[in-house]
Image (tube, coloured by chain):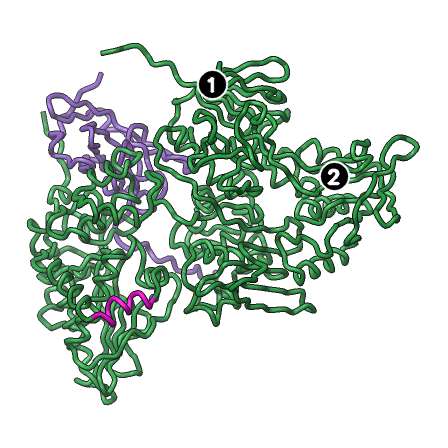
Chain colours: A green, B purple
Amino acid sequence: MDMRVKPRQKLVMVGNGMAGVRTLEELLKIAPGLYDVTVFGAEPHPNYNRILLSPVLAGEQTLDQIVLNPWQWYEENGITLHAGRKVAAIDRVRRVVRAEDGTEAAYDRLLLATGSNAFMLPVPGHDLPGVIAYRDIADTQAMIAAAAKYRQAVVVGGGLLGLEAANGLQRRGMDVTVVHVLPTLMERQLDAAAGRLLQQSLEARGLKFLMGAQTQELVAGDDGRVAAVKFRDGSQLDAQLVVMAVGIRPNTQLAESAGVHCQRGIVVHDTLQTVTDARIYAVGECASHRGVAYGLVAPLFEQAKVAANHLAQFGIGRYAGSLTSTKLKVTGIDLFSAGNFSGGGNTEEIVLSDPTAGVYKKLVLQGDKLVGACLYGDTVDGSWYFKLLREGRSVKDLRDRLMYGESNLGDTGHQGQNKAASMADADEVCGCNGVSKGAICKAIQDKGLFTLDEVRKHTKASASCGSCTGLVEQILMFKAGGDYSATPKKKALCGCTDHGHQDVRDAIRQHRLLTIAAAMQFLEWRTPNGCPTCRPAINYYLISTWPKEAKDDPQSRAINERSHANIQKDGTYSVIPRMWGGETTADELRRIADVVDKYQIPTVKVTGGQRIDLLGVKKEDLPAVWKDIGMPSGHAYAKALRTVKTCVGSEWCRFGTQDSTQMGKDLERALWRMYAPHKVKIAVSGCPRNCAESGIKDVGVIGVDSGWELYVGGNGGIKTEVAQFFCKVKTAQEVLEHAGAFLQLYREEGWYLERTVHYIHRVGLDHVKKKVLDDPANRKALWDRLQAALDGEPDPWFDFDRAGVDARQFGKLEMVKA
Amino acid sequence: MTSWTRICRVDDIPVLGSRRVARAAGVDVAVFRNDQDQVFALLDRCPHKGGPLSQGIVFGTSVACPLHNWTIGLDDGCAKAPDEGCTPRFAVHVEAGEVYLDAVELASLSIDVQAPVAGPARRVLPIAPAA
């Protein structure tokens, strides 16, 4: 064996900005120690958050607060940092980069993250003292210094950057006029109506505007410093500070001089490697991918992830472009736009305009999909619209309520509370973990967080039940601007892979994978045995796709399913026996009572689903408790059929039209032991009074005089969702077949931990109807597959051994006496 | 001086699983086995809210607490960043397929740590104002 240590490869990065450093962070996370890393940065600062320069200029934050990776970070990670050294040349033959001061560094791989340069209008006088761009810390400091000394400022450019600069300078006491060549502001992000509203509210704050004005010359004063701006129509404006914010250009000078192909950016493949030289990568604003150079942070982070993946030699990530959204970082002005907000072509627009209240909203739809949004004055639903846009799912069913936002979709938990901007710092955002808005804002600021995932990890907000996710996203958007990178279009299953749920499902089905190890190997998992997120998901996909062939892996199930009882906060368990359709007998009640006495079970409670819950059972007692109760498992702990709730129906009720109790018992007997992507709840009501609350169940059945109505996709949980009408059938047998076929479709197509309502949202109710209602042969095939899967499936409480319950887990090891 | 006490065979612990070891006093010890047949031992108590780590999902050299999904390193007992906190780690010795723990540690380490009390949390009644 060759015992020589292979020398580490050398990675050199040019540019010390957000895209490049994020790539390094991702790389260090997945392949630490693979490279010796050297970084060249033209600015004499460590990596900082460029997005937050506007709040710094406005005096709302300090420079120290926006540093993302302090000097110490580079040291701790063994990165050689040459700050304040601009790279002058790349020698691709010798594979060396050389800085202006002569510093050289050899590379095996080179990462270009040179960002972009502010574009200066080539008018006479553009190089006078007092004329600056707005791009980096030095520019920001120059503006702050000028604001302390001079009175009049002109900002050329009415785009995002120009308005943020103007706002900052005005906040620092200057008299600011914004000069824009077009008739409305921010034309790349807003339509004319929203642009005018924005101008009005900025004017109300004291900013001045000169629209449709073409700058011709910058005139010098006696001291040689800029003194005025002269326009084409001959008029002029006094100014001792002129900020040029007319656009940015990818900084490709270095790449071009090294012969790397550039065309409005350094041209890269989907792997972020340059088309010219596979050893050279480019990420961020300097890169041109499929003809687009992005100027916002979210796409850069997505690129960083893929580039890191490729540098780490995993080679399975691909960047497929990004959708972007924008938010203006001017305190007190709410503005959001995303996608194709201007419409046109074969699009339709839904518009709400209330100029007096200062609210304007425009949604652009193409077919059944949302393709653009432009919000002014009320941006609460921006993140939601952006999510709909990115996911590209059909909004047909929401269309009539779309304009009124997410809170009008039946959100009970946090309704009326989701105006992130208007919340006080002390207001609670995450009810599960008691996290306040202030705590989230502080973490976003202090720790430099950008993604929902990061906020979850650091604050725990939205990390439990997830009902406040939208609110946290809003705060993130509000705080970090529209640049925050939320869930990409295709979400990876977990950190162990770049593949999404559907990829994993498809691979298991198409390649007949039968074990977790095989699936992980086939899909090139990054970790040796996954994590608590992916293992249970893969395990479910295997056993639901190949029932009776794929072997269940108990160690890849959470404790509740592994020990067939629900773990409680003190480490004891709760036991809920199955009571068919909610009915019980004196004999069963007597046995339950005896068990409570015998095992000294502290609490006996009736649950919300018509069952009896024995709480506080010690783990070592579980097998004996199950045996003594002598009733089947209620699966009250599992991603499986839970309860079938019923009313008394025609058997006793004077209004009942159908025998709902019998229907419930039949459904429960037909479907019990059915594992699913998430828990499944069913209810059967005997008449439209709906006493069993069938409207908020995964499958709701309501008896009517002429038969049964079926509803699907209801949810009484985190966010109450009313079930949608599915079909009406005549016989009890049809109820079984339709409900069963629907659930089998969900079992086969649903993603792990996706409730029926979310599954239906994703694929559309039409899809489900097509598969179950319009195609009787397919319905029967689904029903047959479900029966085949459930046939002979053991009950874990009765068929201990056949169900593969590992008996070792219940007892404790005793120490062997010497 | 270390005196090793035999606990069980490595095979008695499920791969990517754990067993609980009862002690004369104090909270149980959890012994884990990963897919490389390495064995680790930790106090069976998550530093977060006391969850029984023995009941978590084992992956790599970590275990996820079954209560709130904190990830605890099996080799050092410490929570993975950004969570903070550690749980005591017990010395493990494996020889000829047998697992041994240190008798001194078993008898003394963290026996003062309270296990969560079984049963419902005691209901606290509001204190009546003094008459």
Q: Is residue A813 above or below residue A432?
A: above
Q: Which residue is mark 1?
A: A107
Q: What is the three-letter code of the residue carrying label 1? A: Tyr
Q: Is residue A55 above or below residue A731?
A: above
Which residue is pictured at 75% across the width and 40% down the height?
A243
Residue A599 horizontal side relative to residue B87, left or right: left
Residue A496 showing in the rendered view: yes
| 1 and 2 marks in contact (CB < 8 Å) | no
Q: What is the three-letter code of the residue carrying label 2? A: Leu
**Number of on-image labels:** 2
Please tell me which of labels 1 and 2 falls first in the chain.
1
Residue A443 showing in the rendered view: no
Main SS category, magenta section: helix
> Percent x, y for residue A144?
75, 37
Query: Crowding near pointer 2: few (<14 within 10 Å), some, many (20+)?
Result: some
Q: Looking at the rendering, which quadrant does residue B73 occupy?
A: top left
Residue A679 horizontal side relative to residue A629, left or right: right
Residue A353 horizontal side relative to residue B50, left or right: right
Q: Nearer the viewer, residue A291 or A164?
A: A291
Figure quadrant of the C terminus of chain A? top left
Q: Is residue A177 above or below residue A136?
A: below
Instruction: Using the image, name the chain to which the residue with label 1 belongs.
Output: A
Same chain letter for marks 1 and 2:
yes
Q: Which residues are magenta?
A: A765-775
Give yes or no for residue A774 being in the magenta stretch. Answer: yes
Which residue is pictured at 13% across the width and 30% down the height?
B10
Which residue is pictured at 22% across the width and 50% down the height?
A540
Q: Looking at the rendering, which quadrant does residue A133 occupy?
A: top right
